[in-house]
Image (cartoon, coloured by chain):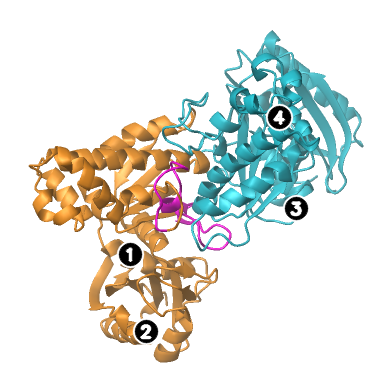
Chain colours: A orange, B cyan
Amino acid sequence: MTKHYAIGIDLGGTNIKAALVERSAGVVFAQSTPTEADRGADHVLRRIVGLVREVIAAAPKKEVAGIGIGAPGTIDWDRTSISYPPNIPGWTKVNLRDVLQEHLGENIHVVVENDANVAALGSAHYGAGRPYDAFIMVTLGTGVGGAIIYQNTIFRGATGGAGEIGHMTIDYEGPMARSGVAGAIEAYLGQRFLSRHARYRLLNYLDSPLHQDAGPDMVDLTPEMLSNAAGGGDEGALSMLAWAGHKLGCVLGAAINLLDIRIVIVGGGVSAAGDLILGPARETVQHFIKPGLREGVLLLQETLGNEVGMLGAAYLVFELLDTHALTPE
Amino acid sequence: MTKHYAIGIDLGGTNIKAALVERSAGVVFAQSTPTEADRGADHVLRRIVGLVREVIAAAPKKEVAGIGIGAPGTIDWDRTSISYPPNIPGWTKVNLRDVLQEHLGENIHVVVENDANVAALGSAHYGAGRPYDAFIMVTLGTGVGGAIIYQNTIFRGATGGAGEIGHMTIDYEGPMARSGVAGAIEAYLGQRFLSRHARYRLLNYLDSPLHQDAGPDMVDLTPEMLSNAAGGGDEGALSMLAWAGHKLGCVLGAAINLLDIRIVIVGGGVSAAGDLILGPARETVQHFIKPGLREGVLLLQETLGNEVGMLGAAYLVFELLDTHALTPE
């Protein structure tokens, strides 16, 4: 009998989200719980196990093929362990498959993958990426995440770490990102760098509502605030988004030259601004692609929202079923 | 009977080179002829056909499995046609497979691939790339070529154009490359850009032999001159190579972040300088890679020289044999 359900987990620093996913219908049941990351790795693991138990209880009996998990941090090539996830202090390296199998039964299949890769896989099968068998995904959130889908699946590189578009430099003498890479795109589009730039840029737009919303020195500026203000016609926010779109276009041009993958799907908070950021990015990207690769370039907005991570995580399990790495009972 | 020979052709703007390649032994016979590109596409095609006939005549009877061709310009996804090769004026789009089969027999297998990709495939099976199943290849010549080897074969992207590392920007406000991309690495390391930089840098090294060798305003500076002068201990040339290595490190960092492929093989004229350019590149590249991908980064010199293109071209045919796309008689 073929099992049509999988559990998809999105392990974040603030919340753990889990969904029961039916392959063609998508999310049929979802549950979420605070991560309480400050209470340490063991506590977080117990919360994951508890949440999975709740979701399994909602599934038709014996119909769950396995559990897929999207997580920050470094994932092993064999997709069982997470090392040093940022935002979960004290978590060194944990074999999440072993932990879940210990608590939920040895026969349950568990696949772990990087959260940006999982979001891209979700987009490929349930979101804006569905019509394409190859695309670049960029997520504009607190940081800048990235992933590559090639031949309908995640391009993993040599050790599983491919797709780190947020760390690509667009100016080798540019501002320093958290990673230490000068001019990395994250040093322009990451949340705290957007805030820093807004401090100067918005001096020319003293009427912008962002001066109220984002607090003194714009320290509380979120991607959502920017996109909302721009949607409301605020010139200051529009100018910020055009600037951000220009920078995004620069790095996407470099990525397209290297990969010859010309479909780009943009998700995350700032992407809610849609064409207000993607328009300027589309204009700029053409200037950073070599002639011969400029046709057919498409920059699209991912509209699935947070669900995309859980869907992609569940799809890790469906992929295993397809390749017969899992034998359905 | 398995055929062990293939013909590998390196179609350049100045010379056409062809080799009879035995799979394990490599080049067993080679021949070359001037391209005479100024006499037009039809003339060049006749010269290719004539050269192939000479090489076939040198092969054991009925032992040639097919012909592989590495060419500049855009190659179709199905690997039969070349469009607009630079350096061959008047060549719009030619189906090289059809032309060769028309003259040499319908049964002969013909595969065409981009010259940078072919060089990388040659390195993967006969050169510095042999120990690795994934690497990035960069060729520092008149321009800056690039290719990606992944799972022991060419990573082609969505339409066959992947690997264009020479067009990746490292400074979105930097100097303009021939392609129109600002700050593309070719705008630093391409031959005429190296010359331009040398004009200023070598004002501080008035004793450098390059002032004699490269002519007024350094217009005749070649990568080989630079590497020879540096090998002889010239401080001016060493300083140029360190500068070039720094720029190379910047773009390789960006490529490694995106691909998680940490082996880089550098070929072409300047690469003859070996550690004099690769040393500074190794130092810089670490600063442009995100933490977590910095270990195991290797920058290696390709030492095969011009042969690598013919070997890789021939290997296109051996690859087809392996995948049973060609049925041996």
The residue labelled by disc 2 is A45
To the question of a shared chain for discs 2 and 3, the answer is no
Residue at horizontal 48%, vertical 37%? B169
Under tag 2, what secondary structure? helix
Residue at horizontal 56%, vertical 35%? B166
Q: In this view, does B40 lie above or below A221?
A: above
Where is residue B317 shown, x and y percent of the image?
73, 41
For the residues labelled 2 and 3, say whether their Cβ atoms are less than 8 Å apart: no
Where is residue A235 shown, x and y percent of the image?
13, 38
Under tag 4, what secondary structure? helix
Residue A211 magenta-highlighted: no
Magenta region: A149-178
Residue at horizontal 34%, vertical 67%? A23
Find the distance from the CA under tag 4 to the CA under tag 1.
49 Å
Please tell me how crowded label 2 is: few (under 14), some (14-19), or many (20+) other residues with Cα within 10 Å.
Answer: some
Residue type at mark 1: give it. Gly
Residue type at mark 2: give it. Leu
The residue labelled by disc 1 is A309
Find the distance from the CA under tag 2 to the CA under tag 3.
43 Å
Find the distance from the CA under tag 1 to the CA under tag 3.
38 Å
Residue type at mark 4: give it. Pro
The residue labelled by disc 4 is B223
